[in-house]
Image: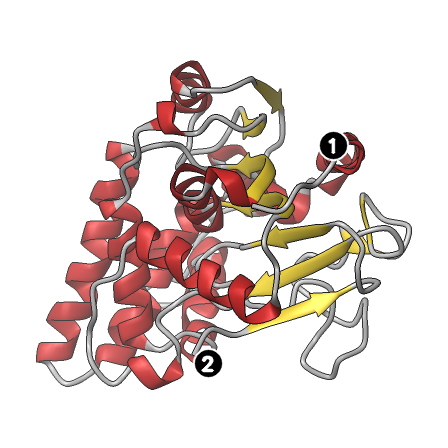
């Protein structure tokens, strides 16, 4: 089963938006079904917004593995995800989409779709993802998976997931953002606690509520398995990078742009929010995405 959620007027140009590993099909609304009520990208995808739901139809997707596949650990690749997306589009009767906008892991899936099915899409926009994983990030994700595996052997995989999430949170923002938010002073207890540690612990404790252990392991591994021959991507492509991104640095995004097989542009902006800038720095993203959507709307759509 491939789950998706459609927004916007039927028959309008379709934009597919896969997000990061913690995202869902609820792009513009919460699970209560009200637009603007908690969707993970509702500041961008809304009526009158940079991705305008009065002019475009948007498809949000749930990336695999789904709940029914989380009883055991599985291996899934970004190519697998792209093929699943194709099955969803076929179910919806969509032969060709105007564009894909992918963030983080969703960007990896989007570029695989562009390489595998060039006749089924118009344009591509990717934030915070390149044609290969960054070695620094591969190392840290590997430590996170090892923590879960070791804690699972001790009978507490959930605690392992909490710790892995806390570790991952240190890579989603910049060191400057941490310095701006926290004082890192001891609280006077024995052993001492620190405000930054309390924050990371809290984010870790909350994560098992939305992320099954085996799903996290599969998606974390899938990022590290990701590889693509960028020259196979021939559609017009817009890349967006942030100077403080620790997971997809500007140098890697530039290398990706240079290797693409079609016309491409790279936008770079400064933000202390690092890899999380697609969620936190909407003032920088909005004009880029608005221009991208306008260009996509001007390109005619032809059936494959």
Tell me which residue sits at (22%, 78%) in the image.
157
Q: Secondary structure at mark 1?
A: loop
- Residue at image position (25%, 85%) is 71
Does 195 sit left or right of 92 as displayed? left
Figure coloring: secondary structure
| Left or right side of 14 for 53 | right
Residue 73 x %, y %? 19, 74
Q: Residue furthest top?
A: 258
Q: Which mark is residue 299?
A: 1
Q: Work out how far the residue at label 2 is from the one at label 1, CA to CA, in angstroms.
A: 42 Å
* Callout 2–callout 1 Cβ contact below 8 Å: no
First in residue order: circle 2 vs circle 1? 2
Q: Is residue 221 visible?
A: yes
Estimate how packed mark 1 is, as few (under 14), some (14 to 19) or many (20 or more) residues with alpha carbons within 10 Å.
few
- Kindly identify the residue that appears in the image at 24 percent across and 42 percent down: 138
Q: Secondary structure at mark 2?
A: helix
Q: Which residue is mark 2?
A: 209
Asked whether, in this view, residue 122 is left or right of residue 187, the answer is right
Residue at the (70%, 41%) spot, across then down:
301
- Residue 187: tell me if it is visible: no
């Amino acid at each position: 089963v491939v789950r998706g959620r459609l927004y916007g007027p039927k028959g309008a140009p379709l934009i597919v938006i896969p997000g990061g590993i913690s995202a869902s099909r609820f792009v513009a609304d919460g699970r209560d079904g009200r637009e603007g009520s908690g969707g993970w990208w509702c500041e961008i995808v809304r009526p009158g917004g940079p991705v305008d739901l009065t002019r475009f139809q948007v498809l949000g997707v749930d990336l695999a593995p789904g709940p029914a596949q989380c009883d055991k650990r599985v291996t899934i690749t970004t190519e697998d995800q792209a093929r699943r997306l194709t099955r969803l589009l076929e179910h919806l009767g969509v032969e060709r989409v105007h564009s894909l906008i992918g963030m983080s892991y969703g960007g990896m899936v989007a570029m695989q779709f562009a390489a595998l099915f060039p006749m089924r899409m118009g344009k591509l926009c990717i934030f915070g993802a390149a044609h290969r994983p960054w070695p620094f990030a591969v190392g840290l994700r590997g430590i996170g998976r090892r923590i879960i595996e070791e804690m699972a052997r001790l009978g507490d995989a959930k605690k392992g997931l909490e710790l892995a999430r806390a570790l991952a949170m240190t890579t989603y923002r910049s060191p400057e953002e941490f310095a701006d938010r926290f004082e890192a002073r001891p609280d006077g207890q024995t052993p001492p606690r620190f405000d930054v540690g309390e924050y990371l612990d809290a984010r870790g404790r909350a994560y098992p509520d939305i992320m099954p252990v085996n799903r996290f392991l599969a998606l974390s591994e899938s990022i590290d398995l990701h590889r693509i021959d960028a020259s196979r991507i021939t559609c017009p492509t817009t890349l967006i990078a942030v100077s403080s991104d620790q997971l997809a640095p500007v140098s890697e995004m530039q290398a990706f742009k240079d290797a693409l097989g079609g016309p491409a542009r790279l936008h770079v902006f400064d933000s202390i929010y690092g890899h999380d800038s697609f969620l936190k720095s909407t003032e920088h993203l909005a004009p880029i995405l608005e221009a991208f959507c306008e260009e996509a709307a001007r390109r005619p759509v032809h059936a494959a």
